[in-house]
Amino acid sequence: MKRLFSLTVAIAFVSIMAWGCTKPTSSPAPSSNASAQADHEGHDLDTTTLAVSAYCGKCGEVKGSDACCAEGAESCDKCGLHKGSTLCCVTLDEAAVGKDLCALCGQIAGSETCCDQDAEKCPDCGLAKGSPLCCKLTVDK
Ligand SMILES: [Zn+2]
Ligand SMILES: [Zn+2]
Ligand SMILES: [Zn+2]
Ligand SMILES: [Zn+2]
């Protein structure tokens, strides 16, 4: 009888310990949510200050960013653009290679079709349907 009792106590103790262990893992969730929100706000600030408007056709980075055409930046040996840049290893139409590409519509920046208000938008990526960057970018996914 005594042994059974101590076994029950041991089981109860273990389950309390387990419960005590799972509790802290569930509590950081709201805090990571909060940090994600802070992150989001930070991104919003970034877009207003940096104004991502185009991707550089020469290096693949955001045009005008610190990384854009930075000297000494590592080049991708597959595509020749900056390694890890937005356009790195993105397969573009011949006509769009080396051209600055609009981040808002996906067309060649400053071209006739760039940011055409009547242009049909791609439901998958939000850029102009059939534009050089349509469904080519994996950013924010
Ligand atoms: Zn550049
Ligand atoms: Zn590449
Ligand atoms: Zn545009
Ligand atoms: Zn698309």
Image: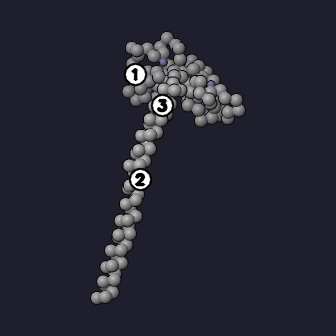
The residues tagged by marks 2 and 1 sit, at their Cα atoms, a distance apart of: 39 Å
For label 3, the residue is: 45
**Disc 2 C-beta below 8 A from ligand 4:** no
| Residue 85 location, quadrant | top right
Residue 61 x %, y %: 59, 28
**130 or 137, nearer to the observer:** 137
**What sort of colour scheme is used for the picture?**
one colour
Q: How many marks?
A: 3
Q: Relative to 54, does residue 5 appear above or below in the rendering?
A: below
For label 1, the residue is: 121
| First in residue order: circle 2 vs circle 1 | 2
For label 2, the residue is: 28
**1 or 50, nearer to the observer:** 50
Q: Quadrant of the C terminus?
A: top left
The residues tagged by marks 3 and 1 sit, at their Cα atoms, a distance apart of: 25 Å
Amino acid type of the residue that numbered disc 3 sits on in the rendered structure: Leu
Element at badge 1?
A: loop
Q: Quadrant of the N terminus?
A: bottom left
